[in-house]
Amino acid sequence: MHTNIVKFIFFVPLILCIHAESFKECKNTADGTFVAVENNCLGYIYCMGDDSYTDLCPTDTYFDAEQQQCAIDDGLHCNRLATPLTETMVQQNEVTQTHPTISSTRTTVGANTGTQLVSTTAPSKRPQCKPTADEYFAYPQRCEYYYRCSRGYLSILRCSFGYGWDFQQNKCLPLKEVQCYRAARRRLY
């Protein structure tokens, strides 16, 4: 009995240390802080002790360390051809505030295929915000994101973990219940 207690006391802290992910970028920052990932303008780290995680901003955005959020990229902030994406990073968290002046842009996305860099260009449409209206729109690439227009300013926001934007009800719902814009659009074609 005494041996089992000693084993328990020894192994529990060891197991907790093994499973906790630690980021050197979070070492001197307060909990709840977002930190940019070095050499990846899309990447950020959310610092929260043992619950810290790394993630990527959505397509057509970059991580703005000063604002602590993803911001819409006008092509001047993030050179996607020079930014390798890692498989361990996934998009997440609340994003931006910027004034929309363009309703359709062309975005260049690069992919490293070993020895050569392949680039594809695809159109992307953003909602145009009216200065007098507050509106919500589905984000076409990811179910958990959505656009918010407020007094002429466009924001890209993310629903809480495990939730997605229901484009019919204009609110975040659990992913099992949500009507994703992307999935509905695919069924139409």
Image (cartoon, rainbow, N blue to C red):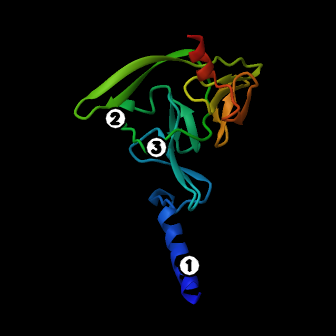
Amino acid type indicated by mark 2: Ala
Q: Residues within 10 Å of mark 2 (few under 14, many from 20)?
A: some
**Residue marked by disc 1:** 8
Q: Which mark is residue 20?
A: none
Residue 165: where, in percent of width, then height? 68, 30
Residue beneath the point at 43% across and 33% down: 78
Q: Which residue extends farthest bottom?
A: 2
Instruction: Say whether disc 3 or disc 2 marks the residue closer to the N-terminus.
Output: 2
Nearer mark to the viewer, of 1 and 2: 1
Amino acid under disc 3: Met
Kindly state the secondary structure of the residue where label 3 is placed.
loop
Residue 62 as seen in the image, left or right of residue 136: left
- Label 2's element? helix
Rendered position, 54 above or below 61 = below
**What residue is drawn where x is 64% and y is 34%?**
157
What residue is shown with label 2? 82
Which of the marked residues, 1 or 2, is nearer the chain's N terminus? 1
Q: Spatial distance from mark 1 to mark 2, Cα to Cα?
A: 48 Å
Q: Quadrant of the N terminus?
A: bottom right
Q: Earlier in the sequence, mark 1 or mark 3?
A: 1
Name the residue located 60 percent from the left edge and 36 percent from the top edge: 95
Q: Do the numbered discs 1 and 3 sit on residues whose CB atoms are within 8 Å?
A: no
Name the residue carrying label 3.
89
